[in-house]
Image (cartoon, rainbow, N blue to C red):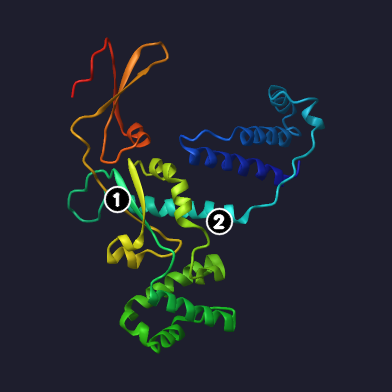
Amino acid sequence: MNINWFYVIILSQAARDKYREWCCETPLHRELILRFIETQAIILSPVCPHVAEKIWQLMGKAGSVLNASWPVSAEVDAYLLKESEYMEETLHDFRIRLKAYVAPKSKAAPPPKPTHAYIYVTESYSSWQATVLQQLQKLYDATGQLPDNKEIIKICQSISALKPVMKKVMPFVSMIKDKFATSGSSALSLTADVKERAILTENLDYLRNSLDLIGVEILPSTDGSDKIAEGCRPGKPMIVFRTEQDFNSAVAIPSMDEKGGRLGTVARCYTGSVVASITKGRAGCWEIEADCEKPT
């Protein structure tokens, strides 16, 4: 077996784990999972023939796995990879912000654990940021690279629209140059490479579960403060955590255990709660002996 196929096994299992995590409460796609198992069995057959053959039989496949055609990779969907990379980077940033929120550097008492969050997104840079990017794009088109900061400063200082914000210009340029070092010329684009709002909305359950929140709302950056509007940029949404008080009473959700016993679940309710968030906000369980209600 070619060593490259060993990495295929490892990477495909990592992709499966990521897919399962991202699905949250959504059922996995049956045909996709069966295709994954089939492919794994075929790839493993040269080194683990007995195990692979057993899997092949359990799947109800005809003949022997040793006679199966070797898997052929489909064409890579570059846009899906960009979406995946965007989600991973965004969630990483959100986790860093959450850590800073619950454990502030000041000596003041930490805030209560957040229950909700606003995610602010924007499709365009602010006017001065767009001007800087346009100048950097011109420099890149002329030389195929970005000049040193001294030259960039001279150019920016000569532009009247940038003079009032020169203190912000060079930190922004440094950030763009760091991104340019890893992403290339796409760092100079005035828009994001992906449809941010659609991706975040589609993966809202995943974000909520990963950050251990009850509710998450996606808003345009213009709905936030001036600081949010200034800090939010294409490809880099901002998250603001908050803590909401639940109602004094909780919802009792009856259920059955595996032995047929009756159980109840305490679920905290917040303004605007939906079934998914109520289920996630379960506070504990108790046994129901009769038709009694959980005391408040």
On screen, residue 172 above or below 246: below
* Count of numbered circles on the image: 2
The image quadrant of residue 128 is: bottom left
The image shows residue 280 at horizontal and vertical percentages of: 35, 34
Q: What crowding class fits label 1: few (fewer than 14 Cα within 10 Å), some (14-19), or many (20 or more)?
A: some
- Name the residue: 62% across, 42% down: 12
On screen, residue 102 above or below 249: below
On screen, residue 265 above or below 274: above
Residue 190 in the figure: left or right of residue 65:
left
The image shows residue 27 at horizontal and vertical percentages of: 52, 33
Three-letter amino acid code of the residue under disc 2: Lys
- Name the residue: 48% across, 51% down: 199
- Name the residue: 58% across, 53% down: 81
Q: Nearer the viewer, residue 63 or 295?
A: 295
In this figure, which residue is indicated by the disc labeled 1?
241
Three-letter amino acid code of the residue under disc 1: Phe
On screen, residue 192 above or below 92: below
* Pointer 1 or 2: first along the chain: 2
Q: Label 2 near label 1: C-beta < 8 Å? A: no
Q: Secondary structure at mark 2?
A: helix
The image shows residue 285 at horizontal and vertical percentages of: 30, 22
In this figure, which residue is indicated by the disc labeled 2?
82
Q: What crowding class fits label 2: few (fewer than 14 Cα within 10 Å), some (14-19), or many (20 or more)?
A: few
